[in-house]
Image (cartoon, rainbow, N blue to C red):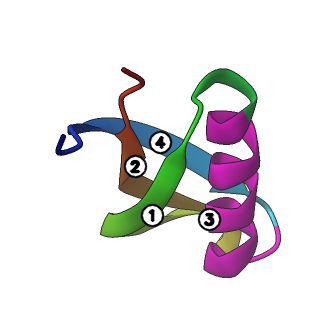
Amino acid sequence: MGSVARTTEISARSETSFEDAIRVGIERATQTLRNVQGAWVKEQEVKIENDQIAAFQVIMKVTFQLEN
């Protein structure tokens, strides 16, 4: 029997870096979703406040395998 996967889109934010925003998003996704297989970073964006980077944001598509 084959397997079926689903993809969901999530947004995550960090004040440190894009890498940290990805980590935060994956950690949160794995608290809710089971069988996470991977993620694709679809968009990256920075928030600017007072001429400085205030936050790093990513939008990711997270793929997880559906259970039988």
Badge 1 local density, few (<14 within 10 Å), some, or many (20+)? Answer: few
Instruction: Name the residue that disc number 4 marks.
Output: 11
* Of labels 3 and 2, the one closer to you: 2
* Of labels 4 and 2, the one closer to you: 2
Question: What segment carries the magenta color?
Answer: 16-30
Residue 62: which disc? 2
At x 45%, y 64%, the residue is 38
- Name the amino acid, label 2: Val
**Is residue 56 at all visible to an observer of this figure?**
yes
Nearest the camera: 28 or 46? 28
At x 79%, y 62%, the residue is 15
Is residue 59 rendered to the left or right of residue 55? left
Q: CA distance from mark 4 to mark 2?
A: 10 Å
Relative height, residue 10 to residue 52 (above, below): above
Instruction: Name the residue that disc number 3 marks.
Output: 22
Relative height, residue 51 to residue 65 (above, below): below
Q: CA distance from mark 3 to mark 4?
A: 9 Å
State the image quarter where residue 23 is shown: bottom right
* The magenta stretch spans residue 44: no
Marks 4 and 1: CB-CB under 8 Å? Answer: no
| Mark 4 or 2, nearer chain start | 4
Marks 1 and 2: CB-CB under 8 Å? Answer: yes
**Magenta segment main secondary structure:** helix
Q: CA distance from mark 3 to mark 2?
A: 11 Å
**Is residue 49 at all visible to an observer of this figure?**
no
- Name the amino acid, label 4: Ser
Residue 25: x %, y % from top left: 63, 49
* Of labels 1 and 3, the one closer to you: 1
Is residue 32 rendered to the left or right of residue 27? left
Badge 3 local density, few (<14 within 10 Å), some, or many (20+)? Answer: many
State the image quarter where residue 45 is shown: bottom left
